[in-house]
Image (cartoon, grey):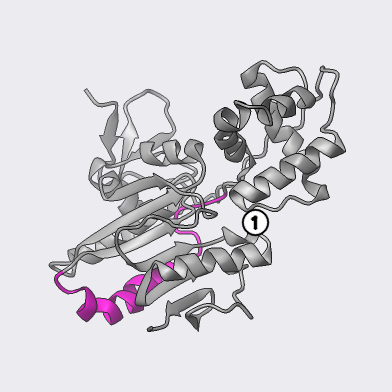
Amino acid sequence: MSKWLRKKRGERGTQAISKQCTICPVQTMSSRDECISSRDYTRLCDLIYAEAGIHLGTERKTMLEVRIKRRLKKLGLDSYGEYCDYLFGHQGLKEELVSLIDVVTTNKTDFFRESGHFDFLVERALPELAERISGRTFTIWSAGCSTGEEPYTMAIVLSEYALTHPGFRFRILASDISRIVLAKAELGVYSNDVVAPVAPSLRRKYFMRSREPGSENVRIVPELRRLIEFRRLNFMDADYGLSEKIDAIFCRNVIIYFDRATQEGILQKLSNCLLPGGYMFVGHAETLHDMKLPLTPVAPALYRRLSG
């Protein structure tokens, strides 16, 4: 028997509490290496930039030490020096690189984050695209989906839209470089605090509560989970390997972690994945000013793919 129960009508929801980024506390190392040497930090930064496009300045050294410490414990190593010797060894790059990128990436997301974008999607974008997508499936991509709150928000919003627009079909692609967050996203289990931004009526409809006594967790209903294809994707890849062009891309609060040249390169590749007239949603803290991209501004943090 499933341990998950659908929420009953009339069940009260929790008050809205924004999800905060979880940062592991700094712990004192008992090993002979209490910090990463300047030489090793430079090597690590160069590797992370080359493989993931993430630029770490000197001010991020303590952050990197905290996060790599998780790998020391996992691998049974005593020092940062031993870790770097292993990582840059013959087998290390093959065995450890993906795990290093997992601990380096920052994952901050919420359900219905920057909700105006979802309002624009259903109130303006879909009506404007209606003729073009008639008779085919609308495709949307959550690029940098983290633990899944964004693509599941898409699924909720588009499912509600479909109820009043017979024949509307959609497909959601969700990608991230981190295997850890993708595993969490596919599972679709969240605490009540995390789903608080979702309207109570939608929580009752699209989430199941746990059968486990005292559990504060809920899970996305299977019907919604089946609508999303999760995939590991590195923005630094030359080709994103999509079999078809996309109608809309959400790449929000992702490119802020890259330097300007890398940002422009990523956005160019994302733009190439958009159909002419398709929409690109970015974070409100991100700017495309002075970038040579086939995009035209439509609204704050929102662009449309030019024809040709």
User: At 62% from the left edge and 62% from the top edge, which residue is drawn?
Assistant: 262
Of 235 and 227, nearer the camera is: 235
> Would you place residue 134 above or below residue 72 in this image?
below
> Would you place residue 72 above or below residue 121 in this image?
above
Q: Residues within 10 Å of mark 1 (few under 14, many from 20)?
A: some
> Viewed as shown, does residue 208 lie left or right of 68?
left
User: At 55% from the left edge and 54% from the top edge, which residue is drawn?
Assistant: 236
Helix, strand or loop for disc 1 = helix
Q: In the rendering, at what x and y percent does residue 218 appear?
A: 37, 37
Residue 256 seen:
yes
> Would you place residue 268 above or below residue 127 in this image?
above
Q: Quadrant of the N terminus?
A: top left
Q: In the rendering, at what x and y percent does residue 157 appear?
A: 32, 61
> Viewed as shown, does residue 156 lie left or right of 262?
left
Residue annotated with mark 1: 257
Q: Which residues are magenta?
A: 108-135
User: At 37% from the left edge and 46% from the top edge, which residue is drawn?
Assistant: 230
User: At 43% from the left edge and 54% from the top edge, which residue is drawn?
Assistant: 150
Of 2 and 231, nearer the camera is: 231
Q: In the rendering, at what x and y percent does residue 156 appear?
A: 31, 56
Residue type pointed to by label 1: Tyr
Q: In the rendering, at what x and y percent does residue 245 appear?
A: 32, 66
